[in-house]
Amino acid sequence: MSAVTEEAASAPATVLAWDLPTRLAKWLLAALVGLAFASKYYGDVGLVWHQWNGLAILVVLVFRLLWGLVGGSTARFSAFLRGPGAALGYGLGLLRGRPAHYLGHNPLGGWMVIALLLVAAAQALTGLFTTDDIIVYAPMTAVASDETIARASALHQQIYPILLGLIALHVVANIAYSALGSDNLIAAMILGRKPAGRYVDPAPATPGSVALAIACLAVAVLVVFGGIALAGGNPFP
């Protein structure tokens, strides 16, 4: 047996956990949220790049919503959204040091994903209506009432620390679980694979269609930019 064959035979077996579109959407959204901070405080005076950044976030969010309906097995909301009882049971098992192992998101992680998506969406949507009445005019300010703009601008500021808090909690939980648990969640979300074993959900995961992912992305772009245009706004800052 050759050295390469022996090395392959001794390597631990792994199974697919998350498909490529799911992983790309996650890391792209994380990068865009970070860039939103940078473009807000270090970008151009008119916050044009910040607005483009927000539009890109909305495209990724709409894509993730669509992919959560038609994507790979572990990407679908129906696969990882479980009731309060399941979340409580998983939390108790985690405290006892005997958590159930999930190939995709566990019950608590699944609800964290939904919370992050909802808060990120609220932050991006309120950003469409913000202005400083001098040089910064977001895509929907031309057709929104003064009351709507004022309320959206206030919410855009108020939601921001909530989003940061959720991101911090998500990062800490993933680092702790990866360091102390049996699954390296960070590596799995990068490489898409987990060690072969007994999981609550079926293993390996079934990947989604690449063609369908491209179609979902095209629809997401159309929904965001077309929706703003149809509502009378300016989709191109």
Image (spheres, grey):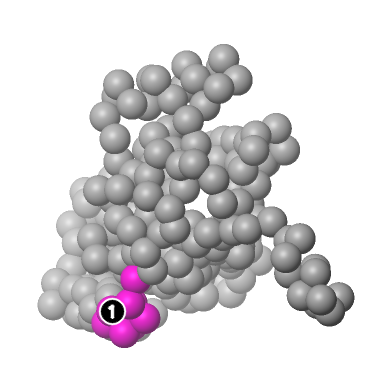
* Residue 2 shows in the view: yes
- Residue bearing mark 1: 212
Looking at the image, residue 134 sits to the left or right of residue 97; the answer is left
Main SS of residues in magenta:
helix
Measured as percent of width and height from the top left, residue 216 is found at: 28, 76
Q: Does the magenta stretch include residue 22?
A: no
Could you say where residue 213 lies in the image, as x and y percent from the top left?
33, 77
Q: Report the residue at 26% width, 29% height from top.
A: 83
| Residue lying at the far front of the rendered structure | 1
Task: Give x and y (percent) for residue 42.
Answer: 66, 66
- In this view, the residue in front, 158 or 80, is 80
Q: Residue at x 23, y 60 (%)?
A: 69
Characterize the local packing of mark 1: few (<14), some (14-19) or many (20 or more) Cα atoms within 10 angstroms. some
In this view, the residue in front, 58 or 174, is: 174
Q: Give the range drawn in magenta.
A: 208-215
Q: Position of residue 177 (x, y in %)?
A: 63, 36
Q: Can residue 61 be seen in this view?
A: no
Looking at the picture, which amino acid does disc 1 mark? Leu
Quadrant of the rendering where the C terminus is positioned: bottom left
> Is residue 213 located in the magenta-colored stretch of the structure?
yes
- Which residue lies at the image location 81% right of the left edge and 76% below the top edge? 1
Report which quarter residue 63 is drawn in.
bottom left
Q: In this view, does 174 lie above or below 203?
A: above
Residue 4 vs residue 168, the one in the foreground: 4
State which quadrant residue 105 falls in.
Answer: top left
